[in-house]
């Protein structure tokens, strides 16, 4: 079963949160960011080309124009392949662990998996980010030697940055599963 | 993600999950509770009078049901958001420190963050501390632009003679001319602040600092009664009159062979004391302890019979209250607000000169020898009623209540006030700056509208996660008792 | 105890103490508020003529500089023979020397313990050395362009006036620097004179007018104020007359400068003194008045 809900990101963009309940101890959360819009793409391209044309008028060198075309093309490729994340997912399996996947706009996917015995807790934390103070969801990793010490913090949904209401939904589900896990 | 805080995950929201549901309900602010934001450059881990004032006052206000947060600048790796005892939330903002732990001010660069915090914490009163703190003045300026109520506490005295004080006084005039209320720590400090910032004395309240009397209890068994010990605890700087001390030590040590000095504290004037000790061969009688931790101060104080304070200027001297609370006879210079602090039977006041201080000390020594000094327990029981943080919080709360009923000057009136109150040149400059800051605020509101800012989950205050836990625990203990 | 008595009276009076809980609001303003405020404690009242008298030092120094430049101009034009100047300088130095001891009837000399023989020795050594080195002085700055020399001398003389010890207790005052700048200016100017004898006389004259003459002035001012006023007046007149023979416009401007310094500036000072608003009170940082260095000696 899967349900979908619309939320806002910290920056004010619309994002959707999709929840899939595969079983009682296995859930998946998908945060989908808005796709790259033709409007913003054309706006950026236009402005780069306008600047290039301005330079061309000033220095009368046609290399500028061809450079501008290359810059836009390569820039777009790099952006789609390494920067723009379309979708971030969090798969939590009670007895197994937590898997985080982020899919780039180009289709590239990067996946991280954390074993359940390493996970200490999943919490919502606050941080100062740029000129904002935001909430973010993170996984606390246990120190293998001392179980009470947190060795590392892994932030989740780093690129979409959902707002608190969305984080709370994910957080509650995660906690349910973690508790089940602890009981068993 | 330059500012993402790392390494600090002691207090995460997992503990506050039960109250997460109320994070979107705006607390119906009764007239009694306020959302207070303390702003100062000076806070722990820095140590000093202002720091402990802010901390203790915040704790007592939390106890009285208010929501309190503290904003300060980052101290080395301590940046981000931290929680202290009882859910006191501290924002360590990544702002550059310029001089003496005070941040650089451009009046604008701190605005986006401060505005974000004020909105997300739903702050109603901004309480800035210390006139040396640039961040405090920045916050006051932005809070007034955002139509928040403002309170300012001044902790220090200033002269009027030299160029630097003329300039700082002018800035203070600008900063305080449209602040709702000002708090000073002594009557002398009030007179000083009123003159410096040309204020109406009616909007200046006097609320002294306090001392935790349980931290400073007498212990006569630690004294060595075969000798007489004079204790000095202060930073060893010129303003604390260490030069006077360097005159007193040889003078008295020659007269009284069983007199000992213990000097706690560190500073540039330590070298002077060391020279005196060297020259008069007093190594066994003058002990220089160096910098003291706050918790060690009491252990040093109780070793002495007489406490000596040689400050040349002081708004409210905490050191003499601490010493008296430990049951010592206090001898002090008569400067600043010191004559207001202790009743005449507990303190011997002297002029700031070696001769007068020596006479005062000799008087104290003769009292000690004749046994006419009050016993430490009696002094302690007298002093402990004078200054308590609960009392300070109660009186500060009254100020907040009063301020909450006042209006914040709207933009037009604020400009009028600035121009009419701060002189034609400065007034116009700052009126222009406040217009710019207003436009900047408009821009920020357009960039990130208020509704996009997540309201923070209260740690303290009427709906605070900590408060509710605290009360639940209390209720449970009550139930189990009954 | 006074507090007990106060408790018995029905209406309590406000006390400026913090340790007592008083039935007044925290923002209560008592009548005694700012009672201890003192204004202009250290402000001095000036008398007009006293200030005018004190401005004499400055007038004198301006005149010295003026006379020095005028003399140099005469020498440069060839209107004044160096022998004449040297002779006049020698005579006036001798007269000054006699005066210097006569004014306080030898008290200063007895104090310093310096013999006449030592004075004679040092002056002879100085004159001999300057005479010996005058060809060097003459050629020392010859390769520098004349415009630069003029600019540098003007600059140095201005510096001399700025750093001169007029009796003010300020950080900028440095009589050594001031004297050095004047001598440097004289060396610069001497190099533009026709011969090395000229250079020698010029430097000697500079020493006389910038080093010896102020010493005599100081003594005159302290011992015989009337005489000092007359001498100031005379030197002002002589400087003006000297300048008049060179440039009438310069003389008028210089006269205006002297009048404004000696009459207008004191007037302004006294008027502005009325606006002085210096605040003192218990919040001031206490000053340590004793000399504490004795404990460390």
Image: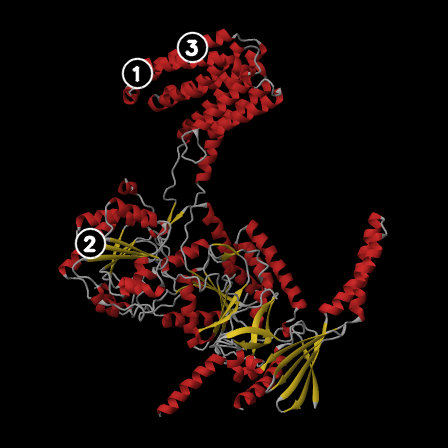
Which is in the foreground here, disc 1 or disc 2? 2
For disc 3, the neighbor class at 10 Å (few under 14, some 14 to 19, many from 20) is some
Relative to B261, B315 lies left or right: right
How far from the left and from the top, in percent, is residue C116? 32, 14
Mark 1 falls within which chain?
A: C
Q: State the separation of the CA atoms marked 1 and 2.
A: 54 Å
User: Does residue C183 lie above or below A154 as drawn?
Assistant: above
Q: Are marks 3 and 1 on the same chain?
A: yes
The mark found on residue B190 in the picture is: none
**Camera-nearest residue between A75 and C58:** A75
Mark 2 falls within which chain?
A: B
Q: State the separation of the CA atoms marked 3 and 1.
A: 20 Å
Q: Quadrant of the N terminus of chain C?
A: bottom left
Q: Quadrant of the C terminus of chain C?
A: top left
How far from the left and from the top, in percent, is residue B41? 48, 61
For disc 2, the neighbor class at 10 Å (few under 14, some 14 to 19, many from 20) is some
- From the image, tell me which residue sits under label 1: C115
- The residue shown at (78%, 68%) is A40
| Residue A158, image quadrant | bottom right
- The residue shown at (56%, 88%) is A181
Q: Are marks 1 and 2 in contact (CB under 8 Å)?
A: no
Mark 2 lies on a secondary structure that is strand
**Camera-nearest residue between B272 and B468:** B272
- From the image, tell me which residue sits under label 3: C90
**Camera-nearest residue between C97 and B459:** B459
């Amino acid at each position: 079963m899967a349900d979908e809900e619309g939320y806002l990101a910290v920056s004010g963009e619309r994002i959707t949160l999709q929840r899939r309940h595969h079983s009682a101890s296995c859930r998946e959360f998908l945060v989908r960011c808005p796709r790259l819009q033709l409007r913003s793409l054309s706006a950026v391209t236009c402005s780069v080309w306008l600047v290039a044309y301005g330079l061309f008028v000033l220095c009368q060198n046609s290399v500028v124009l061809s450079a501008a075309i290359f810059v836009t093309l390569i820039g777009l490729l790099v952006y789609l392949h390494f920067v723009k994340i379309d979708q971030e997912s969090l798969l939590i399996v009670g007895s197994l662990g937590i898997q985080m996947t982020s899919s780039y706009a180009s289709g590239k996917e990067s996946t991280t998996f954390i074993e359940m015995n390493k996970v200490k807790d999943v919490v919502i934390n606050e941080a100062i980010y740029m000129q904002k103070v935001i909430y973010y969801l993170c996984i606390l990793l246990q120190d293998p030697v001392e179980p009470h010490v947190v060795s590392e913090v892994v932030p989740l949904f780093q690129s979409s940055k959902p707002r608190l209401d969305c984080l709370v939904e994910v957080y509650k589900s995660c906690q349910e599963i973690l508790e089940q896990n602890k009981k068993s | 993600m330059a500012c993402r805080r790392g390494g600090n995950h002691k207090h995460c929201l997992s503990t506050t999950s039960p109250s997460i549901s109320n994070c979107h309900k705006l607390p119906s602010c009764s007239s009694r509770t306020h959302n207070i934001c303390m702003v100062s450059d000076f806070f722990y881990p820095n140590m000093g009078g202002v720091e402990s004032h802010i901390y203790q006052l915040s704790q007592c206000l939390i106890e009285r049901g208010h929501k309190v947060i503290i904003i300060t600048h980052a101290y080395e790796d301590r940046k981000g958001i931290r929680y202290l005892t009882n859910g006191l939330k501290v924002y360590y903002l990544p702002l550059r420190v310029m001089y003496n732990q005070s941040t650089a001010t451009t009046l604008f660069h701190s605005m986006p963050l401060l505005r974000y915090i004020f909105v997300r914490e739903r702050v109603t009163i901004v309480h800035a501390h210390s006139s040396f703190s640039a961040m405090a003045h920045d916050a006051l300026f932005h809070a007034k632009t955002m139509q928040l109520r403002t309170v300012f506490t001044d902790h220090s005295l200033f002269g009027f003679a030299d160029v630097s004080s003329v300039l700082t006084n002018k800035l203070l005039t600008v900063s305080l001319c449209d602040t709702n209320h000002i708090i000073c720590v002594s009557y002398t400090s009030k007179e000083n602040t009123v003159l410096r910032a040309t204020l109406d004395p009616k909007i200046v309240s006097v609320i002294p600092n306090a001392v935790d009397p349980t931290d400073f209890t007498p212990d006569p068994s630690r004294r060595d009664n075969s000798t007489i010990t004079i204790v000095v605890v202060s930073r060893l700087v010129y303003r604390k009159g260490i030069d006077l001390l360097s005159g007193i030590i040889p003078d008295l040590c020659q007269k009284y062979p069983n007199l000992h000095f213990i000097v706690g504290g560190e500073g540039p004037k330590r070298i002077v004391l060391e020279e005196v000790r060297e020259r008069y061969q007093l190594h066994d009688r003058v002990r220089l302890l160096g910098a003291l931790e706050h918790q060690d101060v009491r252990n040093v104080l109780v070793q002495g019979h007489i406490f000596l304070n040689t400050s040349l200027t002081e708004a409210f001297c905490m050191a003499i209250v601490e010493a008296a609370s430990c049951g010592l006879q206090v001898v002090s210079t008569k400067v600043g607000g010191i004559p207001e602090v202790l009743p005449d039977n507990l303190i011997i006041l002297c002029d700031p000169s070696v001769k007068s201080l020596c006479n005062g000390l000799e008087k104290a020594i003769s009292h000690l020898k004749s046994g006419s000094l009050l016993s430490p327990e009696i002094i302690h029981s007298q002093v402990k009623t004078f200054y308590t943080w609960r009392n300070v919080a109660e009186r500060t709360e009254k100020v907040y209540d009063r301020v909450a009923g006042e209006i914040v000057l709207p933009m037009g009136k604020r400009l009028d006030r600035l121009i009419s109150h701060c002189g034609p040149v400065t007034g116009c400059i700052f009126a222009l700056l406040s217009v710019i800051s207003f436009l900047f605020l408009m821009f920020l509101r357009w960039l990130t509208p208020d509704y996009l800012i997540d309201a923070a989950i209260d740690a303290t205050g009427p709906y605070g996660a900590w408060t509710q836990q605290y009360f639940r625990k209390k209720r449970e203990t009550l139930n189990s008792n009954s | 105890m006074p507090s007990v008595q106060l408790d018995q009276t029905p209406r309590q009076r406000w006390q400026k103490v913090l340790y007592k809980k008083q039935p007044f609001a925290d923002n209560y303003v008592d009548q005694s508020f700012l009672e201890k405020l003192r204004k202009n404690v250290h402000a001095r009242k000036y008398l007009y003529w006293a200030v005018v008298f004190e401005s004499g030092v400055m007038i004198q120094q301006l005149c010295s500089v003026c006379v020095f430049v005028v003399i140099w101009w005469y020498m440069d034009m060839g209107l004044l023979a160096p022998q004449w100047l040297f002779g006049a300088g020698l005579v006036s130095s001798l007269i000054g020397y006699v005066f210097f001891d006569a004014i306080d009837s030898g008290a200063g000399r007895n104090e310093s313990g310096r013999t006449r023989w030592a004075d004679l020795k040092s002056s002879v050594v100085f004159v001999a050395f300057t005479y010996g080195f005058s060809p060097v002085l003459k050629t020392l700055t010859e390769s520098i362009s004349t415009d630069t020399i003029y600019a540098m001398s003007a600059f140095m003389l201005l510096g001399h006036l700025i750093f001169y010890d007029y009796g003010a207790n300020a950080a900028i005052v440095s009589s050594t620097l001031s004297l050095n700048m004047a001598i440097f200016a004289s060396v610069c100017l001497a190099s533009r004179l026709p011969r090395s004898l000229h250079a020698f006389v010029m430097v000697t004259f500079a020493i006389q007018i910038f080093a010896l003459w102020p010493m005599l002035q100081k003594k005159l001012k302290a011992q015989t104020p009337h005489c000092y006023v007359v001498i100031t007046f005379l030197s002002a007149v002589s400087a003006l007359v000297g300048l008049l023979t060179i440039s009438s416009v310069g003389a008028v401007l210089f006269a205006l400068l002297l009048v404004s310094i000696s009459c207008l500036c004191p007037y302004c000072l006294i008027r502005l003194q009325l606006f002085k608003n210096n605040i003192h009170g218990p919040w001031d940082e206490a000053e340590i008045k004793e000399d504490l260095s004795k404990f460390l000696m």
